[in-house]
Image: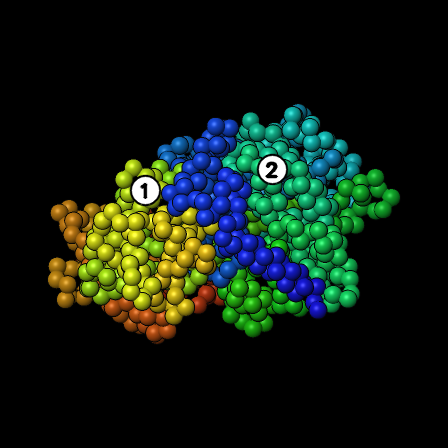
Amino acid sequence: MNAKKWIKQAALFSVSLSLFASAMPGVTHAASGATSSDMNASQLAASAPVAAQASATTGCVPYGPEPGYQYDPNTLMKLMGKPRTGTYGPFLSAHRGVWGTNLGLSPSGEPLQDAAENSITAIDNTAKLKFEMVELDVKEAEDGLVLMHDYTLGRTTTAGWDNPMYEWDVFNQVTPNGDTPQYEGNPSQLTEESFGQIIIDYNPLVKMAGWTIKYLEDNVHLKIFDKYSSKSLGTMKVGGVDVSAVGEWKESTDTVPSLRKALQYIGDHYPGMTVVLDLRHLDEVKSAMDVIDQVKNCQGTPAMDWVILKPFANIFPDGLFGHNEISEPPAPNSLVGLLGFGALDYKWIPVVSNRLVEPNPPGEPSVIPCNSVSDTSPYSYYTPCPSGPDVSQIKGSILDYVSDWNNPSVVTIENGYNGDGSDTNPLKAAYNYATSYSTNMQSWRPADVLAKAPVFVNGKTVIGFNWKDDGMGAYPVYKETAKDYVDARQTAGILTVEDAPLVLKNELLTRDATQRAISKVVDWNQFDTSLFYKIVDATSGKVLEVPGNYYDNGAKVVLNDYNGSDAQLWNFKRVGSSSTVFHIVHTVSGQAMDIPVGGNSNQVQIFEQNEHPNLEFFLDHPAQGGMFAINNVQAQHIVPSSDGYSVIFTPGTSEVGQWFVIPVYDRVIATKDLVISYGDKYEDNNVYVLPQSGNTFSKYKFRVITNANGTYTFINPVTMQVLAQYGRSSSNIFFAQLQLEGFFNKSLQEWEVGSSSSSTLTYSIFRRKAYYSDNGPSREWGSFTTPGTIINDDSLLLLPGWYGKPMDESWRFTIK
């Protein structure tokens, strides 16, 4: 038997035993010592607020999207390991924290602080923006791991600022021996004996500096980069052409933190935040595992449960096991072969892409070769081996490599597949395989440094630069190959991002659902009963509905695909003075969910509100935060029927259903002081742009259906009509009936929503492109030609130009 299959079966057996024990009547509840048969429903429902009060008294404040909620890393990782869905997502991770300048305000109106990358302040900013994850870069110092993106200290720290002669300038540096920063290839100074004598004073390797963690934490300050400053940063030659860069460095109050300090800080201040560690080398992995073992959050949860290790492909070229049978040892360069079976107790996300190919080609991110100095050099010990997730560094096919990581200890895969449909792309088959059971993770990185002005070089346009991983220079970013954020989310449902404020603006329509799906309620007094909710079966993605127009007593509750109708909306009304027991009220009828008395049917129904306990329910987190069990106070569980349509109730000892409870909002799409409208007559299916003032009718509002491919469908809840393109060759936009899955015209109703600037409140709305152009993204955020133009054959820009108004920036859409 294959080793990984044996471990999977053992894990499943362990889970089965746990479920069996939890289902046994009379099993003792560890928190109270009472048995399930001794506890009534109100006591069970009241257990959650007790934990929250205990945390508050110790100064340990749960971290979540809003007061009363806490993110649950266990649920987050479980959902990352499932195929992408329209119910929630994408999940977001702030790369190096939320860093930079002029970051704006948090959702609560709190100013974000200027921050250096991988700093404690950047972590605080991440928390202010309510990100569920933060990804941190680590490097080996003299006596352990510190947070650092580069292998060297000169770019991001004040290591050379004590002597201005030694201040490292990535764009303009010239050392006494004539070495300068590099924009292509591997820097010569890292392949010569002179490295130790010359460059170390300017830009020392983190480990070569000879500084302990304590010295770095006490004395070496991080620098903040202001990419939006208009000050000249210097020039670099790209293809023989000078390209000027702008930006400015300034010192921060943060010093270089150790990994131990950062994890403990997160655990003490933000219990519920998930941490991802970017790892390039085996010694970093081993050291990170040691640190993880030493840390718990303020609620006593071990870091092993909320920290994920993300190794590049070069570290474990044989994969997780190496496809060896149980009778054979794991492959020598596999994760288990190098670290032992105990490594499966940790959480992993392996990385594969076409990045950092050896040998390093001109104009690409650089690496530091293992043998950059001779074996006799005193500096050879400190020089890290080449790193990278490139598929050329693994053994066997990329598909076999990725399939070898299909294991319960692996959260998901980060695959750099960019949507290129060519069968020659080695990442495509691996992407298709992994996304059949999990959600793909990718990074989105806009230019670190902006060019003063775009420069056309050898058929491409340089718009900026990205810092090299070695800290010795930068490499150009081209407009034609750079992805905007809307493109990046097409092939990934988990995104590690920079420019966090812009990303959050682009996720306006998804964040509420995503955050609720991975959060547990820790204070039921703050559960908002004023909102309308959809109740989603976590397995099928279908929602609770009372179909048709029959809303009398006894009307059945069923499961259906979400279509944005009022028949699928519910409200929670507290029963008496209880904070945890509710009537679950159908919005249209005003009737409450009910467990019928007597009869042969065990189908859930609606009934007029009264004080009978059959209408009283509480929500519980039986296993996963974010997913609820809906329990009647008389110990009945609400579960989907095996027919996929009916909703039934079962005794308390039976299987517990899992449901998402997600708020639903009505939106208005407006252009300055006008709104997109269905028109004055419902039977007229043209799209109108009408004055916003005085038009308060619900026909001007939309509900948003989020699709599994990352697009949106805009539906009017009164008419049940959706915004659509008239045809693939048409620039006309009209309202149509919602198409079911599989219909050819369904894609004509799917739209992308994006913005290129976090400083404005406006958006552009596009029809999803059928393919990704070889020449790069077809969208032009800054300028449009004629309204309603077909862009790249199958991408329609939704603009109000057909209304006869001039087109300018004021005609971008706001979504309220």
Residue occupying image coordinates x 37% and y 59%? 649
Q: Amino acid at mark 2?
A: Lys
Q: Position of residue 442 (x, y in %)?
A: 53, 55
**Which residue matches tag 1?**
528
Q: Is residue 736 left or right of residue 250?
A: left
The quadrant holding residue 607 is bottom left
Residue occupying image coordinates x 80% and y 44%? 380
Q: Position of residue 481 (x, y in %)?
A: 51, 58
How far apart, in angstroms, are the residues tagged by discs 1 and 2?
Answer: 31 Å
Give the image's coloring scheme.
Answer: rainbow
Q: Is residue 659 left or right of residue 801?
A: right
Q: Residue furthest right?
A: 376
Q: Amino acid at mark 1?
A: Asp
**Which residue matches tag 2?**
296
Q: Which mark is residue 412?
A: none
Q: Against 402, is 808 above or below?
A: above
Q: Residues within 10 Å of mark 1 (few under 14, many from 20)?
A: few
Q: Position of residue 306 (x, y in %)?
A: 57, 44
- SS under mark 2: loop
Q: Nearer the viewer, residue 570 or 594?
A: 594
Residue occupying image coordinates x 63% and y 37%? 295
